[in-house]
Amino acid sequence: MISLPNNSVVPAHSVLTWTKGGTTTSVRWRSENGTPPPKRMVVADDIMTADAAYQLASKGTALLWLGDFQNARQLLNALARRVDANPRKRKGPKAPAAFAQAPPPAPPLSMTETFHRHRMAQAQRAHTLGMLMIPFDAGHVIPLRRAPDVRQACAEAYGTADEPYAVSMRELLGLIGAHEWRRKGLEIPALQASIHPHYGVFAPLRSEYVALVADAPLPSGCDLAFDIGTGTGVLAAVLARRGVQRIVATDRDPRALACARENLARLKFAGRVQVVEVDLFPEGRAPLVVCNPPWVPGRASSALERAVYDEEGRMLRGFIAGLAAHLTPGGEGWLILSDLAEHLGLRTRAELEAAFAAAGLKVLGRMDAKPSHKKAADAADPLHAARAAEVVSLWRLAPV
């Protein structure tokens, strides 16, 4: 077993070291979501059983896999089955002694409590499954039997690799999946074309919000639009396809900026859409300003989650507060927002409307759409009641 220093601040290039057969090896630790290097680690291979691996991983001991790669994938699936079969249950009162009066049943959890417990369970699941790690040689080559060629997928996410490193198998599978999304693309009906998301950039899987932007009436004389937090560039592309002659698309994530530029060039809109690195608004005013901020207040645990969770509602509040100053007379701001947070008890409709009023905005109208994704119909989902009631809205806002 290997112990690593317990640093309060994780070094940019933490090192993992192990010894096998008298040979000591050191590699860099890599984690895209900022997970610290493991404090304890053992070398594992094909002779390790899934039960033994689960006992180690669930207690925070990492497994550096040096066996067959395909066996490692099977082990990860086995670990997932064990994690899912042993969920952390809410602690209730102890069973009453014989002839003693039974205590009243515990009150049911609120939807907010259910949400937070679900998030904690998901985080614990990710932590346990993240304990299975895969070594890499320089050049993104996996030095294991039956390992796939993942050089392109890793280069797209990491760039060049001049030295060995190690990542969790879970992260590696995420890289491979992202590479396939980027290669194949995602068909967008409103565009009649595909968007190709990059690793770490949220894919526009929820078609209802894209359709709202495609269907909402454009303000009169709309020859310029701002797309705030463009991501893949999908909404900027929809506006361009609708005939808006000039669009400024903003983002502050380098991966999103590269992704948007590539998609817009592929769709032949690069001449009409300027992609700018800036936090929220570009300089100037426009007849139309569009924003699809993260829908749920909360702290993101990865780059992808930043498209879902908006810590303290920073982006939502920033857009609402700054909108009026970036609209031309007669212009509109389109806020695309789900009410899922309201059903989860994380934000109220009154708070949202109060933010509009405080920013000197009025509501010109609202278009609604019901989500059609699988979780909305999955009664086994802990958050099913909230998801089933969810509505995605395009709020048309203008200065009072």
Image (cartoon, rainbow, N blue to C red):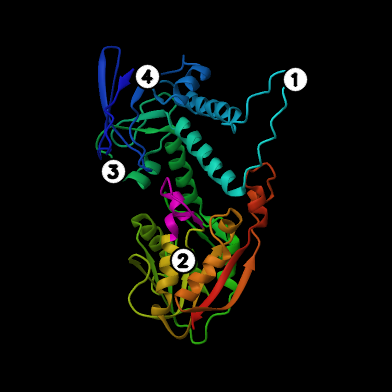
Picture disc at residue 43: 4
Between residue 44 and residue 361, name the one nearer to us.
Answer: 361
Q: Secondary structure at mark 4?
A: strand
Location of residue 99 by image quarter: top right
Q: Earlier in the sequence, mark 3 or mark 2?
A: 3
Q: Amino acid at mark 1?
A: Phe
Between the C-alphas of marks 4 and 1, the distance is 53 Å
Location of residue 59 by image quarter: top left
Q: Amino acid at mark 2?
A: Leu
Q: Earlier in the sequence, mark 2 or mark 4?
A: 4
Q: Earlier in the sequence, mark 2 or mark 1?
A: 1
Q: Position of residue 154 (x, y in %)?
A: 37, 41
- CB under 8 Å between discs 2 and 4: no
Q: Is residue 308 magenta?
A: yes
The residue carrying pointer 3 sits among few (fewer than 14), some (14 to 19) or many (20 or more) residues within 10 Å by Cα, namely few
Task: Choose mark 4 or mark 1, whichever is in front.
Answer: 1
The residue located at (48%, 20%) in the rendering is 55
Between the C-alphas of marks 2 and 1, the distance is 74 Å
Between the C-alphas of marks 3 and 4, the distance is 26 Å
